Image: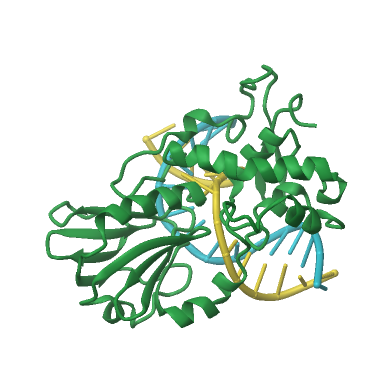
Chain colours: A green, B cyan, C yellow
Amino acid sequence: MPELPEVETICRGLRQLLPGRRITNVEVREPRLRSRVDGDFSSRLLGRTILAVGRRGKYLLVFLEGERVWLSHLGMSGKLIFVAASKPREKHDHIIVGLDGSHELRYHDPRRFGLAAVVSHSELSSMPQMRNLGPDPFDSRFNGARLYSLARGCRRRIRDLLIDQRVVAGLGNIYANEILFRAGIRPTTRAWKLGRGSIETLANRVPKVLREAIRWCGTSFSDYRDAEDRFGEFQNHLNVYDRAGEKCRVCGVKIKRVAIGNRSAFYCPRCQR
DNA sequence: CGGTGGACCTGCTGGC
DNA sequence: TGCCAGCAGGTCCACC
């Protein structure tokens, strides 16, 4: 589900809602996420005031007093939703964080591929999940030169290079496919075959497509909702992802679906060469 | 080392 | 109507 635009949308929403609130209750109803939620999770949150909310790649960071950070990854089907405490709980509401008695932040995740942990600032920066992340796509350190140096001699397909979080942090299958459409490159192309010009175009499209998706508050393909449980709108603007058999919005040719590894890739056979 | 394929989960859809 | 296969936005690990 959540790639960078979805996590950024949630981050912006929570930033308006959380800072200044105190965590008055924590309930871990299902600790079996991708890795087990630590036994100290609740005690490390309890009683702390939230200072700020941030994002690194697809990770959401909730900064607390006492140099602590609540680190959250939503996996494939995770939602992090701010609601009135009186709202009935639902199946798969795995973690409930009570705020000042009146509201709750609920972590909901049917497939349980997510991550929830509370760590110190120093632990955060030494975690492999953070250390191995490439630059943010909006950071000037992500550019054509970097992408070209990684693509040169790389035998993988360009779609797989783009969703490698070490290359650039935050791209997943939807946006990798959309970005490749905008660059006119087929997702199945071997990275080493792309020349400097194509790579420059590609690197340039990365922040463009992501900014546009953020403007539409992300893609609600099925599970994704923002911090207040509202749908995103970018699914109405997708050019290729999940559009196999439908007409290309630019040239009218039918969009194709192919498997790369275990995952689908989508492209327009005319617009992408 | 680089690259690939499967495992981890639940839920939904489409074919029979 | 039921059953089963296949698929889904991500990450990590074993294996070649």
Percent of width and height locating residue A100: 14, 65
Q: Residue at x 22, y 65 (%)?
A: A20
Look at the picture and state if A39 lies above or below A194.
below
Percent of width and height locating residue A172: 58, 50
Direction from residue A13 to residue A224 in the image, left or right: right
- Residue A90 at least partly seen: no
Q: Picture quarter containing residue C14?
A: bottom right
Percent of width and height locating residue A36: 43, 75
Q: Picture quarter containing residue A249?
A: top right
Percent of width and height locating residue A194: 84, 44
- Residue A255 at least partly seen: yes
Direction from residue A240 to residue A110 in the image, left or right: left
Residue A195 versus residue A81: which sits nearer the camera? A195
Residue A258 versus residue B16: which sits nearer the camera? A258
Residue found at the far front of this picture: A140
Residue A119 versus residue A111: which sits nearer the camera? A119
Q: Residue at x 59, y 51 (%)?
A: A171
In the rendered image, the quadrant that contains the C terminus of chain A is top right
Direction from residue B5 to residue A241 in the image, left or right: left
The number of callouts visible is 0
Q: Residue at x 58, y 34 (%)?
A: A242
